[in-house]
Image: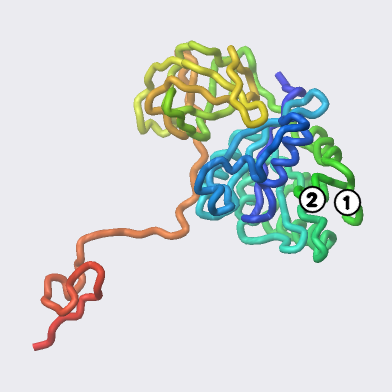
Amino acid sequence: MKREDLRNIAIIAHVDHGKTTLVDEMLKQGGAFRENQVVNDRVMDSNAIERERGITILAKNTSCMYNGVKINIVDTPGHADFSGEVERILKMVNGVLLLVDSFEGTMPQTRFVLQKALELGHKIIVVVNKTDRPDARNHEVVDEVLELLLDLDATEEQLDSPVVFCSGRLGCSSYNPDEMGTDFKPLFEKIIEHIPAPEGDETGELQVLVSSIDYNDYVGRIAVGRVERGVIKQNQEVMVCDYHNRTAPFKAKIVSLNQFEGLNKVPVESATVGDIIAFSGIEGVTIGQTITSVSAPEALPFVKISEPTVEMTFSVNTSPFAGREGKFVTSRRTAIPQTR
């Protein structure tokens, strides 16, 4: 089964290259808001800390429509501190928009997130953003992205990735680096054309990999994932499995089932291959677990998260000065042993 009516994409970039602003405009032009609706800037940054600091911390799901095709969009963090969020989310999509600032070009986090997308074999659309800047370097930035793709051993197909020039703030896009364009039609057209439609066996046994966890005061933990195989239904009895066998398989029931439409979660009776869903009712569900049918509990491999950049170990003091008297012996001061 191939879902030509659906595309799943993630937006990846270095911090402050304009991911959330671009998503805002995609939602507006994709009909997610009424024409007279007042919408805050960076509407996807719903967390209080995100709005205070002006950064994205948690990956967010949303969707818009274009020419009868639903485009599921995942806005990902740009800081290296939250790279685990990016790695998990990339498992839910079939392609990515690689956003690059038209002046700054490729940056350290650009390299990291692109490498993860290439390892998963995702299709890439290069989006040079902020082309309205007076200091924009559109041609040079495209060359920088190509050099980065070469450094990361991209395939021939990935090296031939299309390029779109955008201004997320002005809501315009173009295939020509020297033109601004008038709307996001070129971007939407390229997404439909270049990003592959989700495929899977609709008649097979259910498989949903939990890639993200949300929380609601009324229903508790909400699992978010993509249907890889089969059909999931509301009030369905399922089996929860762990690929690494950290927990024993157990039965549960899907209480509520939702899909993402714009900024809202819309209740649905069922979802099939390729749909990104949010569901509740499974107490203790966590990232990496697989929701399967009771008759065929087959867990999906969970993407390994990269090792932390900084690691700290706290242990008992075994140095030569351990237990010696000193002038400063509290944990906040450096121990200086007395000399006799």
Q: Percent from the top left, x then y, of residue 75?
A: 63, 41
Give the residue type that dot 1 points to.
Met
Give the residue type that dot 2 points to.
Ser
Q: Is residue 21 above or below residue 310?
A: above
Split into 4 quadrants, where in the image is the N terminus? top right
* Numbered circle sitting on residue 180: 1
Q: Percent from the top left, x then y, of residue 89?
A: 58, 39
Can I make out residue 103 in this image? yes
Q: Secondary structure at mark 1?
A: loop
Q: Is residue 108 above or below residue 173?
A: below
Residue under the point 68% across and 54% down: 17
Residue 237 occupies quadrant: top left
Which residue is at the far left? 340
Observer-nearest of 13 and 303: 13
Q: Secondary structure at mark 2?
A: strand
Is residue 225 toward the left or the right of residue 30 in the image?
left
Residue marked by disc 2: 167
